[in-house]
């Protein structure tokens, strides 16, 4: 029987062998084949070929490392992309790169947390990072890592699958809200204590610290600022455009500046402090100035400039979260805003309690009713 008349050889993937026929098919990157005797029919060969990919074959399980690579491609525009990538790499290194993502259990996450609790933090840059003896990761760092890991599992696990991070038991409890801000008078003293010049040139560290202290912007936002974002020298009230990147979208709003914030940005423009800069130089200058003012080393962080600014806005508005969110650049109803205002609730409640006085009602006058004596003679 020739090939043109043999119906069995017309089936895709079928070839004739010495003992009969063989049907083959590529299934998920690998070749699958099966042999049959010479009396096999074309219908049997076609059914056998179709059965190779109808769920009877074992599906390829995606590793957690491959899932992380796919996930990171979807968040490349996120401001914290580098941090998320680093946290996922630390977790995957412990859990196992080749493990299927669906095989991770809450017990595995508990073991990861125990490992992190015994790990020393790393300080320094690039290849010069060194572990600090006698110190371990604090709960806030572990919670931040777990938050990024939980969002990764939520995005990559099948619908309805349990999230191992959400179901673990060793997750550190969040700290009660604390007020990290300091009085604005002390903020002004710290800025004033920083040197105005560095090697004969205007100190850009002081210029940037002043912007942080009186506008509430964080370092990443200061780096992204452009001359077209500011309106501080022209006519009208000083304003700035604020760009907040969320995923692939960028929300841009325009907000008013306080007089101190406008003055800080005018100095920023005059000094030409645009673009990237070295965090450590600014951080060291701020810490030295804080020690000079009276804050022991390590008790004041440069991030506390933003906390102090937003805490002052919170105090001036009696805890109005909508106004605080506007100055902070948060989305309406953001939990981050609540983080700044919650620490002041006790003080605000006390102020309201002291001023909330119910006026006392006047006591009714005593009325003496005289008995009627009509018709009676005394």
Image (cartoon, grey):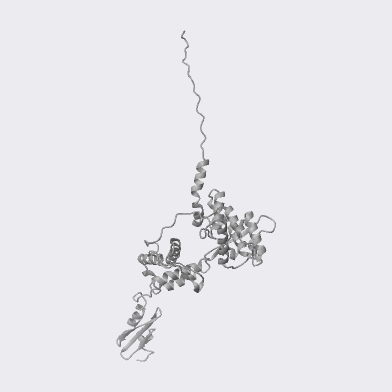
Image height check: is 139 above or below 316?
below
Name the residue rendered at 49%, 56% in the picture.
335
Image height check: is 23 above or below 106?
below
**Extreme residue in the right direction:** 235
Percent position (x, y) of residue 176? 45, 54
Image height check: is 40 above or below 293?
below
* Residue situated in front as seen by the camera: 60 or 203: 203
| Number of marks | 0
Percent position (x, y) of residue 348? 51, 47
Percent position (x, y) of residue 198? 63, 66
* Residue situated in front as seen by the camera: 351 or 370: 351
What quarter of the picture does the N terminus occupy? bottom left
**Extreme residue in the top direction:** 377
Hey, which quadrant is residue 150 in on the image? bottom left
Q: Is residue 329 visible?
A: no
Residue 117 is left or right of residue 226, and the answer is left
Q: Is residue 21 visible?
A: yes
Percent position (x, y) of residue 128? 50, 73
Hey, which quadrant is residue 23 in on the image? bottom left
């Amino acid at each position: 029987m020739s090939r043109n008349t043999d119906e069995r050889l017309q089936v895709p993937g079928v070839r004739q062998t010495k003992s009969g026929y063989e049907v083959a098919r590529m299934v998920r990157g690998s070749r699958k084949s099966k042999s049959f005797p010479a009396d096999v029919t074309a219908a049997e060969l076609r059914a056998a070929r179709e059965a190779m990919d109808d769920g009877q074959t074992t599906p390829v399980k995606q590793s957690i490392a491959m899932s992380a690579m796919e996930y990171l491609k979807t968040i490349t525009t996120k401001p914290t992309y580098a941090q998320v990538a680093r946290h996922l790499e630390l977790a995957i290194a412990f859990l196992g790169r080749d493990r299927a993502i669906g095989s991770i259990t809450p017990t595995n996450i508990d073991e990861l947390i125990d490992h992190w609790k015994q790990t020393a933090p790393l300080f320094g840059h690039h290849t010069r990072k060194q572990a600090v003896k006698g110190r371990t990761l604090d709960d806030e760092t572990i919670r931040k890592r777990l938050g990024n890991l939980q969002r990764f599992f939520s995005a990559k696990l099948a619908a309805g699958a349990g999230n191992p991070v959400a179901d673990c038991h060793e997750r550190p409890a969040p700290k009660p809200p604390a007020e990290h801000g300091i009085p604005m008078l002390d903020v002004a003293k710290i800025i004033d204590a920083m040197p105005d010049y560095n090697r004969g040139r205007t100190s850009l560290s002081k210029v940037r610290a002043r912007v942080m202290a009186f506008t509430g912007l964080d370092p990443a936002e200061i780096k992204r600022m452009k001359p077209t974002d500011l309106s501080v020298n022209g006519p009208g009230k000083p304003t700035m455009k604020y760009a907040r990147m969320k995923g692939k979208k960028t929300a841009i709003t325009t907000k008013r500046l306080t007089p101190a914030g406008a003055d800080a940005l005018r100095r920023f423009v005059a000094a030409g402090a645009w673009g990237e800069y070295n965090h450590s130089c600014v951080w060291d200058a701020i810490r030295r100035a804080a020690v000079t003012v009276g804050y022991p080393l390590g008790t004041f962080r440069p991030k506390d400039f933003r906390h102090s600014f937003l805490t002052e806005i919170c105090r001036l508005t009696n805890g109005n979260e909508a106004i605080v969110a506007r100055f902070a650049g948060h989305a309406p109803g953001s939990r981050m805003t609540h983080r700044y205002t919650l620490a002041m609730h006790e003080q605000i409640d006390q102020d309201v309690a002291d001023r909330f006085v119910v006026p006392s009602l006047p006591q009714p006058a005593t009325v003496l009713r005289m008995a009627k004596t009509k018709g009676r003679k005394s």
